[in-house]
């Protein structure tokens, strides 16, 4: 894994990497802060239009490194049953959003209606609605990935939706690039 250096000289190395997904690498830079390198357009949307929501991550855009956008964020904790309130909120959201079958253009409406008609806590409803409405400005298609890996808990015990929505088009491009690499790297032809 390559080493990245931030403008202030902070080195992001394999040793302080604490998380990774399809689009992002996350590095701990102090006791309470992380830096995320990401190619996910949904993260840009979160940073620009979804700040000051109780259940959405606090993100400060730092710069770009190659294809990655770089964000500073609080270090959140992994969700466990010990986080009683956040766990309850997560289970309630899982029940509402997981069964949704999303079709291309209807997806935002489907999600927003499901949240609106639910009996989720008001702050959760507000954060999810903001997330879906703002992401609608970014992409025609979203995919939902409501799972434990994609939510976290802040220092006050609040459930935080760090990564439950993505952009389907971007997902397709990542897979196409990987498949292309595998095919061209192989000795088949
Ligand atoms: N603010 C954070 N604090 C601590 N760990 C984090 C934070 N954000 C993400 N992570 C960890 O990094 C992993 C990948 O981040 P995620 O946002 O899900 O990226 P991706 O879009 O690539 O799936 C998460 O599953 C989580 O374990
Ligand atoms: Mg993720």
Image (cartoon, rainbow, N blue to C red):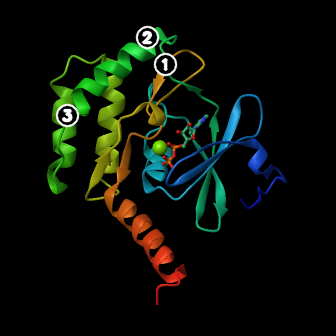
First in sequence, mark 3 or 2: give its number.
Answer: 2
The percent coordinates of residue 20 (x first, y second) are: 58, 47
* Disc assigned to residue 158: 1
The percent coordinates of residue 27 (x first, y second) are: 69, 44
Count of all numbered marks drawn on residues in the image: 3
- State whether residue 81 is above or below residue 10: above
**Label 1: few (<14), some or many (≥20) within 10 Å?**
many
Residue 55, quarter of the rendered image? top left
**Label 2: few (<14), some or many (≥20) within 10 Å?**
few
Relative to residue 124, is residue 152 drawn left or right?
right
Relative to residue 137, is residue 57 drawn left or right?
right
Residue at the far right: name it. Answer: 9
Q: Residue at x 76, y 40 (%)?
A: 29
Question: Comparing marks 1 and 3, which lies closer to the viewer?
Answer: 3
The secondary element bearing badge 1 is classed as loop
Distance between the Cα atoms at labels 1 and 3? 24 Å
First in sequence, mark 2 or 1: give its number.
Answer: 2
**Label 3: few (<14), some or many (≥20) within 10 Å?**
few
Give the labeled residue for mark 2.
85
Q: Residue at x 16, y 52 (%)?
A: 103
Is disc 3 in contact with disc 2, using a CB cutoff of under 8 Å?
A: no
The percent coordinates of residue 95 (x first, y second) are: 24, 24
Residue at the far front: name it. Answer: 188
Front in this rendered view, residue 184 or 10: 184
Relative to residue 65, is residue 140 drawn left or right?
left
Residue 3, quarter of the rendered image? bottom right
* Disc assigned to residue 86: none
Considering the image in quadrants, where does the N terminus appear? bottom right
The secondary element bearing badge 2 is classed as helix
* Disc assigned to residue 99: 3
Is disc 2 in contact with disc 1, using a CB cutoff of under 8 Å?
A: yes
- State whether residue 178 is above or below residue 151: below
């Amino acid at each position: 894994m390559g080493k990245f250096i931030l403008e202030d000289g902070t080195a992001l190395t394999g040793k302080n990497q604490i998380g990774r997904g399809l689009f992002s690498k996350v590095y701990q830079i102090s006791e309470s802060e992380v830096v995320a390198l990401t190619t996910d357009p949904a993260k840009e949307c979160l940073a620009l239009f979804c700040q000051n929501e109780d259940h959405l991550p606090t993100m400060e855009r730092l710069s770009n490194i190659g294809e990655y956008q770089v964000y500073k964020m609080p270090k959140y904790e992994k969700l466990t049953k010990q986080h009683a309130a956040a766990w309850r909120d997560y289970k309630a959201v899982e029940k509402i959003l997981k069964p949704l079958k999303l079709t291309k253009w209807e997806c935002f409406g489907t999600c927003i209606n499901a949240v609106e008609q639910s009996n989720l806590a008001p702050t959760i409803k507000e954060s999810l609605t903001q997330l879906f409405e703002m992401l609608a400005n970014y992409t025609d298609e979203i995919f939902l990935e409501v799972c434990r890996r994609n939510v976290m808990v802040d220092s006050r015990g609040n459930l935080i939706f760090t990564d439950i929505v993505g952009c389907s088009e971007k997902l397709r491009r990542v897979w196409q690039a990987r498949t292309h690499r595998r095919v061209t790297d192989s000795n088949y032809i």
